[in-house]
Image: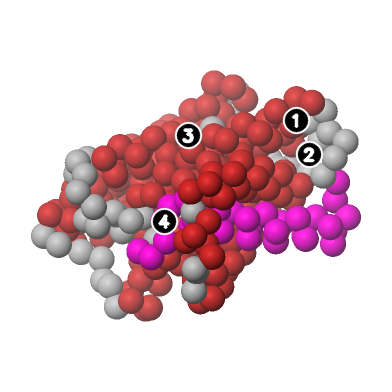
Amino acid sequence: MPEALHPALPYAVLTAGVLVVSSASILIRFAQGLGVPSLSLAAWRLTLAALILTPFVLARSREEILNLAPRDVGLAALAGAFLAIHFATWIASLAYTSVAASTVLVTTNPIWIAAASWLLFRERPGAGLAVGIALALAGSLAIFAAGETSPAGKDPALGNALALIGSIMVSGYLLIGRSLRTRLSLLTYIWLVYSAAAGVLLLAVLFTGGPMLGFAAAAYAILLALAVGPQLGGHTAFNWALRYLSPAFIAIAILGEPVGAALLAFLILGERVAPLELAGFVLLLIGIYCAARAERRGTSTR
């Protein structure tokens, strides 16, 4: 590992990040119910996160930012664009399909991560990681199949397609982050990426004529909670872990999000979990466990 720390710490931070991010879909549903359009919601989430980070960046990372290589700035901007499209499409998907189906499809990125790592970096997944991917994806397919037999949402096909696009986009974001996090501090990296994503989303709202103001006070409170919790807490945990764990493993661990999201949707929104969905959740957790064991073995031999 790049730094001396307890071997379990990256896994603990990643687990905490998954738990926090699991609340995002519920908060988004509440904000949409209060009349906040999906694109405006995404723009507010990233803009608030970038603004909250700015004073800390100016105080602690000004020198690093002034000395950034143009290539790194460009890569951070590209990662931000991927992240912006991810949030725009995934948040929109929650208006059309169930929380379980949306979060399952948006976390299918192990497929895209493994494929891209093999094609771009010639990194074939080891046997343990491959088993973890297979089990996790089997669980995802079981949950998706359960959603198809009992569809929820006003246009499940559209919502599922949007969530799938969001999954592909976040895969690009994680792969770029893998490279940048070896050269940039966490604070500098997330500020650059979140700011770039916020800029892309604000331009999208401007060009589409969407609103950014005029919502109820409760809506702004939810938007702030999204920025502080799932974005700054959850996604920052993922970005920190990228320095110590592989993008493929992080992508698999994020597959735990549908479990937490579906449980919250059942408790808060009344969305029931079918037996097939429950079986899918079990497969997901077993897959994450197998991948964690494989990752630890790989780390110990580096």
Q: Position of residue 55 (x, y in %)?
A: 59, 44
Q: Residue at x 31, y 58 (%)?
A: 246
Between 281 and 289, the residue placed more toward the observer is 289
Q: Which residue is mark 4?
A: 185
Q: CA distance from mark 2 to mark 3?
A: 22 Å
Between 59 and 296, the residue placed more toward the observer is 59
Q: Position of residue 103 (x, y in %)?
A: 53, 44
Whether residue 296 can be seen here: yes
Q: Which residue is mark 1?
A: 219
Q: Position of residue 258 (x, y in %)?
A: 47, 40
Number of residues whose C-alpha sits closer than 10 Å to that of mark 2, classed few (under 14), some (14–19) or many (20 or more)? many
Q: Helix or strand or loop: what does disc 1 sit on?
A: helix
Can you say whether 36 is above or below 273 in the image?
below
Do labels 2 and 1 touch, CB within 8 Å? yes
Q: Helix or strand or loop: what does disc 4 sit on?
A: loop
- Decide which of tag 2 and tag 3 comes sooner along the chain: 3
